[in-house]
Image (spheres, rainbow, N blue to C red):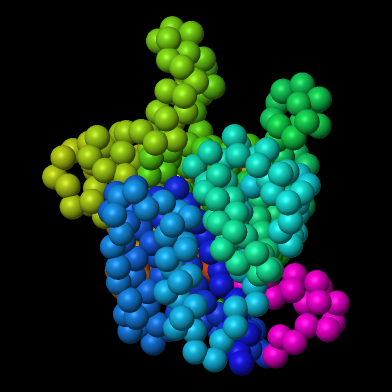
Amino acid sequence: MTQSIISLNSGSSSIKFALFDCDAAGPNFVAGGKIERIGNDPHMRIKHADGRVLAERTWPNHYRHRDLLADLFDWGLKRLEQRTVVGIGHRVVHGGTRFVKPQRVDDNLLNVLDTFCPLAPLHQPHNLIAIRSIAELCPDLLQVACFDTAFHHDRPALSTRFAIPRHFHDQGIRKYGFHGLSYEYITQRLIELDPITARGRVIVAHLGNGASLCGVLNGQSVDTSMGFTALDGLMMGTRCGAIDPGVVLHFQTQLGMSVAEVEDLLYRQSGLLGVSGVSSDMRALSESQIPAADEAIEMFAWRAARECGGLMASLGGLDGFVFTAGIGENHSDVRARICRRLAWTGLRLDDTANAQNASVISAPDSAVVVRVIPTDEERMIALHTIAVMGQDYDGQGDLD
Ligand code: ADP
């Protein structure tokens, strides 16, 4: 029997999953996919590592995370020939100051993680629903929580503070930073692909529906654009990013908006969707003829480049730049718009390489090496899960 691990990344409207065999050389990807449009005719597609579509399915609207995971397991476990699932790793967005390494899940951990839900309302509750659903479906299965905040934990104290009275910081009101599993994976890949650049001053741009930047120095996070919550920093698909806190006060005191209305506005109605009035999806904006759609794309690029200036001050310069996630990996026009605004750093794009989504997209005479590296948070989760299992089994685990 081959021992296998499942990685789960459960969000509000989608669940990404991947199955890995625990080979001696590390996790070996077997199959994976995504359940999308939860709440609106959920649809699932599973692909084999060789690209074959293994299954496609649509469920009725009322199927939510627990029902979908139950069906997925029912389907999957029947087809796992010669495999035993020995552990499930989960992306958990917020670990607070307390959880700075992946943790084996138990009731105590879940109770503490519940208290972080207000800090990541779009993600944390859905991460935890997946863990609780699996605990109900397979009570004996080992589950591991892997935190997006963890990669940023050891960065300089200055970049974790808000300029508010000190006691709030001590209560945990501080900048955490997110997308840590993606940054950790990219940092490891960069060491393999380009060890010299990896030892230098690098900005990683994780540009998906959620978007953030991380300044990485010699493999360590030194500064990042997201803060206390995943609302801060860059403009995103539906999130506003950094905003004058006076605007939030104005919404409440002058426009009479409730807390729930302001939360909905800033998390779900803003960003690309709010500015364009067209869509939160970058591809849809590129295809639109409406001027506000182009303005939203340009604003996204300008905000990203502007934030890079801040990170460069934290890093003391720039040697490498990595684009990743849906927009970063695929959208050459957005990459070009951001890079044009960084030309003052000596960064020069190779337009042909950029148009081809090549792995190196900077010109030979560029002062900054620019790369496109596909992220793989699911693999990072699998690696952490295997590591935690190794500790749990205290050397007696039979993982190979
Ligand atoms: P999430 O944060 O939900 O994981 P993704 O990393 O999947 O998001 O990124 C979604 C964004 O990436 C969307 O704005 C989408 O338009 C964009 N995107 C995805 N694929 C492509 C592509 N082939 N070309 C251009 N943009 C793309």
Residue located 71% across and 85% down the image: 399
Residue 278: name its quadrant. Answer: top left
| Stretch of the chain drawn in magenta | 380-400
Q: Residue furthest top?
A: 254
Side of 343 relative to 112 (left or right) = left
Residue located 40% across and 28% down the image: 265
Side of 354 relative to 144 (left or right) = left
Q: Can residue 81 be seen by looking at this rendering? A: yes
Residue 102: name its quadrant. Answer: bottom right
User: Which image quarter is the C terminus in?
Assistant: bottom right
Reply above or below: 169 against 284.
above
Q: Nearer the viewer, residue 385 or 153?
A: 385
Reply above or below: 27 against 350.
below
Q: Nearer the viewer, residue 198 or 185?
A: 185
Residue located 48% across and 8% down the image: 253
Reply above or below: 57 against 260.
below
User: Which image quarter is the N terminus in?
Assistant: bottom right
Task: Name the spot of residue 294 as percent of width and height, x first.
Answer: 24, 43
Side of 203 relative to 389 (left or right) = left
Task: Name the spot of residue 361 as percent of width and height, x first.
Answer: 41, 70
Q: Can residue 383 be seen by looking at this rendering? A: no
